[in-house]
Image (tube, rainbow, N blue to C red):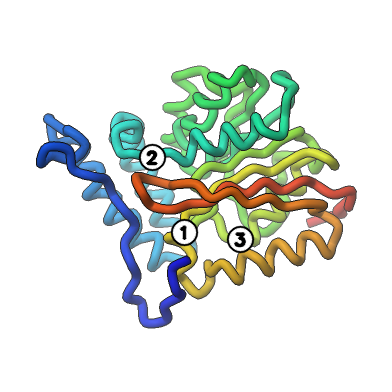
Amino acid sequence: MAASRANGDYKPMTHGKTVNGSLNGDTNGELGEYLVKRIDLHARMSKDPSGKSVIEWYNGEAVLYEKQFDHANFVYHKDVAAGVARVVTDKEARILDAGAGTGKVAVELKKLGFTNIDGLDGAENMLKLAEKKGLYKKYIHCMVGPKKISQLEDATYDVVSCGGSIAKGHLRYDTIKTLLRLVKPGGYFVFSCAQWNFQFPDFSRNCLERCFDDLKETGLCSGIDELKSFHIGDEVGYIYTLQRGDRVLNGT
């Protein structure tokens, strides 16, 4: 686990590997451009607690993101989908893909036979690209924060998936409760979190564990599983599977 740092000197996330002297065999320079722009994204993630500049990045770079994601050594989306398949056998299970982006997790879910998927994201241009591919039944454009999502009823979904979005500058740990409450009792919330995030004091592993403890104490979560994985390249990440408890929440 990366140590938390208080002086603002943060370790950058892995942005790709070289193949024969070029980035992942990139021949047209677009992948290199994308990986350079990811450095700007991570600077925004580190410095903007509101997340507004991060949404601006995704809206502005949606097309480049979509074209180059699969060439950049990301693996978390496949592991989140596999995590869903480990706990759910019903291929008609109702799934919400939170932080859907252009639908990378949904593509993997569909490969595994899941068909009943809604997508939610705060970046409208990312969702528009997902819609062109016909990946979701519903496309929900909204931000996720610590309060109840007004567009959705509690205990609606059998599963909520979230790949790569619970991260510094994206969705904070307090949004785990927001998304878990959308799951039916006995259902599951499966999400990824890159180890890179743990270096930030407000995103440390201890903070995550306190969040989990609170969810269990309130009865909203009945069980938690952690599986070591990878986020991008050889950058370590984790897949977390939370089972929804029986607690009913009222109001916000």
Q: Please give the residue where the numbered disc 1 appears in the rendered image.
A: 195
**Which residue is found at the position 37% from the left and 82% from the top?**
7
Amino acid type at image mark 2: Phe
Which quarter of the rendered picture does the C terminus lie within?
bottom right
Q: CA distance from mark 2 to mark 3?
A: 22 Å
Q: Of the residues under marks 2 and 1, which one precedes in the sequence?
A: 2
Q: Please give the residue where the numbered disc 2 appears in the rendered image.
A: 74
**Which residue is found at the position 69% from the left and 43% from the top?**
189
- Locate residue 112, reporting x and y percent: 58, 21
**Which residue is found at the position 58% from the left and 29% from the top?**
139
Q: Nearer the viewer, residue 99 or 225?
A: 225
**Mark in front: 1 vs 3:** 1
Q: Nearer the viewer, residue 206 or 136?
A: 206
Amino acid type at image mark 3: Tyr
Q: Please give the residue where the numbered disc 3 appears in the rendered image.
A: 173
As drawn, 53 above or below 132:
below
**Which residue is found at the position 68% from the left and 50% from the top?**
225
The label on residue 209 is: none
Q: Is residue 184 left or right of residue 83?
A: right
Q: Of the residues under marks 2 and 3, which one precedes in the sequence?
A: 2
Amino acid type at image mark 1: Gln
User: Does dot 1 land on a helix, a strand or a loop?
Assistant: helix
